[in-house]
Image (spheres, rainbow, N blue to C red):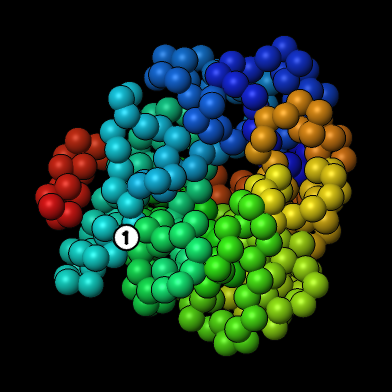
Amino acid sequence: MNAAIVGIAGPVLSEAEAALFRAHPPAGVILFGRNIESPGQLVALVASLRGVLAADAVLMVDQEGGRVARLRPPHWPAQPPAAAIGRLHANDAAKGVRAAWLAGAVIGLECAAAGFDVVTAPVLDLRMAGASGVIGDRAFAEDPEAVGALGAAMAEGLLAAGVQPVGKHIPGHGRAVADSHLELPRVDTANLEADFRPFAMNARLPWAMTAHVLYTALDPERPATLSPAVIGRIIRQRIGFDGVLVSDDLAMGALSGAPAARAAAALAAGCDLALYCTGDAADTAAVLSASPEVAPVALARMRAARDLARSCRRDLDAPALAAERDALLA
């Protein structure tokens, strides 16, 4: 397997995409709204993907709840945003933690039933006044202890459903005043302990996703995704994260350069996997062709993440859990 997770163009796997994946097997595929039309169509697409992907490859989806959701009405129910859970937690901490677990379990069951292994949630970024709205209500709260506790509960719910959670965006995107989808955010604050805290509280999560943010006090030249200093000294050592580290989407406007060069830089900086989401045929081929095989340590981390989700999986009643969550948040 090559050390890249990639997108595909549409709601069916094309012959050209299947041939590319056979020639240069990706470590996984991530699906977006453009790939998902209905439950029946998604079942067929997942089967096609499983037919060409390696046994260790993952199927990934962004399904946080709120604004960031690929499984949507009318075929799938809407899920509440993290901020709604944070507001409950501010009034009643125990109920907030329970709601976060329920939200993770409901989303996890939904995604597992659709065929996904990995769900890119919880968001562990802080909600900051004056920051870009790209995070906004995707964050649980401003308080790092609350974010850490609620993120941990949501991750436990996802694991109980049998899917692998991804903490994002490490080491913290909440302070950014620019949207990294469009441009490179720059954070000049030297004291980032509050930003790191939710990730440190969740350092044992099986996956984390990097932030395309330039922290000038940590590395004045490179954003976290491309910075050996941030990944090595901050993410791996100071925060203590030792799971699968995947880049955020390398096609985002925060970064520059050819797709293959972006992937190479992220992997050289210490990411285990490069994520490239556009589904553009030429760019995807370039990323996969240029990506080396998944490193042995990264493969071990992927297998440990899979085994963890399998060991945590429980028999859960999705409608009952959703009803309890909705009652708490009402």
Q: How many marks?
A: 1
Left or right side of 104 for 28: right
Height in image: 61 above or below 145?
above
Give the amino acid type for the residue marked by disc 1 in the picture: Ala
Residue at 61%, 51% in the rendered image: 181
Q: Quadrant of the N terminus?
A: top right
- Quadrant housing residue 55: top right
Height in image: 19 above or below 286?
above
Residue 309 point in image, percent of width and height: 46, 46
Height in image: 123 above or below 42?
below
Residue at 75%, 77% in the rendered image: 219
In the foreground, 51 or 124 = 124
Name the residue carrying label 1. 83
Left or right side of 219 for 154: left
Q: Residue furthest bottom?
A: 191
In the foreground, 173 or 152 = 173
Residue at 41%, 56% in the rendered image: 138
Under tag 1, what secondary structure? helix
- Quadrant housing residue 187: bottom right
Residue 285 point in image, percent of width and height: 81, 30
Crowding at dot 1, Cα within 10 Å, few <14 / some 14-19 / many 20+, comes out as some
Q: Is residue 233 visible?
A: no
Residue 184 point in image, percent of width and height: 68, 62
Residue at 81%, 39% in the rendered image: 287
Left or right side of 327 for 149: right
Height in image: 189 above or below 72?
below
Q: Is residue 20 visible?
A: yes
Residue 66 point in image, percent of width and height: 35, 47
